[in-house]
Amino acid sequence: MKNRKSQSAVIRFGPALKALFLCLLIAGSAVGFVWQKGQIYQLGQQILQREIHLKQLKDTNQKLGDQLAMLCSPPMLDKRARELNLGLGPAQPSQIWRLPEPAPVSSEYQNAARRLAARQTGATTQ
């Protein structure tokens, strides 16, 4: 049988080092797990707060949209114009101009206009 004194230090402390490494690995994993759970909780709280804020913004947007629709309605505009004494009223027939609908442009005319435009741009670049 060999004497323990003649065994190298690595062989004597090997099992202890393996146990220490295993304990550190388990402890590190546990700390990482707890940290990760804390991060998940914080992110969940942030999501909840932002969803609440989004709902408030949607409610405010809805109220402002309803208010805008009310303020833009013809009866409300008429009432406001009377309040400010702007002297506005319905248009007189002499103030209305009727414009005739332009006739559709033929494809021959469009092609001629394109050729003319191409010639003019070609002449300016030379």
Image (cartoon, helix red, strand yellow):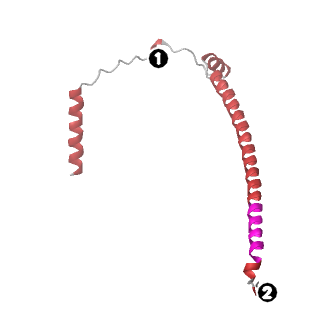
Q: Which amino acid does label 1 sit on?
A: Gln
Q: Where is residue 85 in the image (x, y as percent from the top left)?
A: 65, 21
**Residue at image mark 1:** 95
Q: Check disc 2 and report its element: helix, strand or loop.
A: helix
Q: Which amino acid does label 2 sit on?
A: Lys
Q: What stretch is highlighted in magenta?
A: 13-28
Residue at 20% x, 37% y is 115
User: Which is nearer the eye, 29 or 66?
Assistant: 29
Q: Where is residue 19 in the image (x, y as percent from the top left)?
A: 77, 68
Q: Nearer the viewer, mark 1 or mark 2?
A: 2
Label 1 Cα neighbours within 10 Å, binned few <14 / some 14-19 / many ≥20: few
Label 2 Cα neighbours within 10 Å, binned few <14 / some 14-19 / many ≥20: few
User: Which is nearer the eye, 25 or 121?
Assistant: 25
**Comes first in the chain, label 1 or label 2:** 2
**Residue at image mark 2:** 5
- Main SS type for the magenta part? helix
Q: Check disc 1 and report its element: helix, strand or loop.
A: helix
